Amino acid sequence: MKTHRPLFARVVISLLVAMLGGLLGGSSALADSSVAIAISGTVDGSPESVYVSGLAQVTSTLVKADATFNHPARVILSIDLHNVTGKGLRTGATYVTKGQDEVLRPLAPSDVVQVAFPFYPNTTIGFRSARSGLASFNLSFDVTTGNITGGTATVSTPSF
């Protein structure tokens, strides 16, 4: 036996899908800006202190102000530390990072952002002895576009 949904139900479902698509598709995020920032510093600890350096890729996406929900302009920052490596100060061992993080920050002319990241010896089982480093970024922004206009970064030992 065939059953037919009423026409009204199909119309309502179609309208709901169209409205949801409009809400999701009508994003308030704008184009990204991305910069490579030199980063370096020493993480102290056991079994040895590690000098970490490389290029951090920081991408900023502007999220426009939303008067409906009383949200000021913000930026989504994507911080990628895959091109950052370390060298053991006692053994000379190579350390790798796999850190990638995203944070939502209020848009301001300048901001200090800190993210913890893992690093470990570059061996097949090195991940078993992963440690944490702290990456600190001093960033400046164009407050109209949300683009990153400059930045510096350091690595240090986390205090947690």
Image: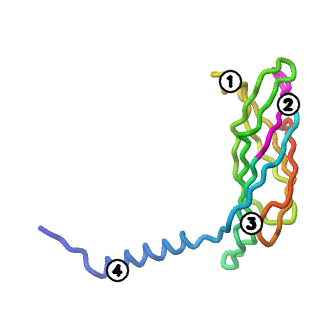
Compared to 29, does 154 lie above or below?
A: above
For the residues bearing labels 4 and 2, Cβ distance under 8 angstroms: no
- Report the magenta residues as a range: 44-56
State which quadrant residue 155 falls in: top right
Image quadrant holding the N terminus, namely: bottom left
Q: Which residue is mark 2?
A: 51
What is the secondary structure assignment of the residue under circle 1?
A: helix
What is the secondary structure assignment of the residue under circle 4?
A: helix
Disc on the earlier residue, 2 or 3: 2
Q: Which mark is residue 159?
A: none
Q: Observer-nearest residue: 44 or 90? A: 90
- For the residue marked with disc 4, what is the amino acid? Val
Q: Which residue is mark 1?
A: 126
Disc on the earlier residue, 4 or 2: 4
Q: Position of residue 137 (x, y in %)?
A: 84, 50
In 3D space, how far apart are the residues under numbered discs 1 and 4 (Cα atoms)?
58 Å
Q: Is residue 108 magenta?
A: no
Q: Is residue 47 magenta?
A: yes
The colour scheme of the drawn protein is: rainbow
- For the residue marked with disc 2, what is the amino acid? Tyr
Q: Which residue is mark 3?
A: 74
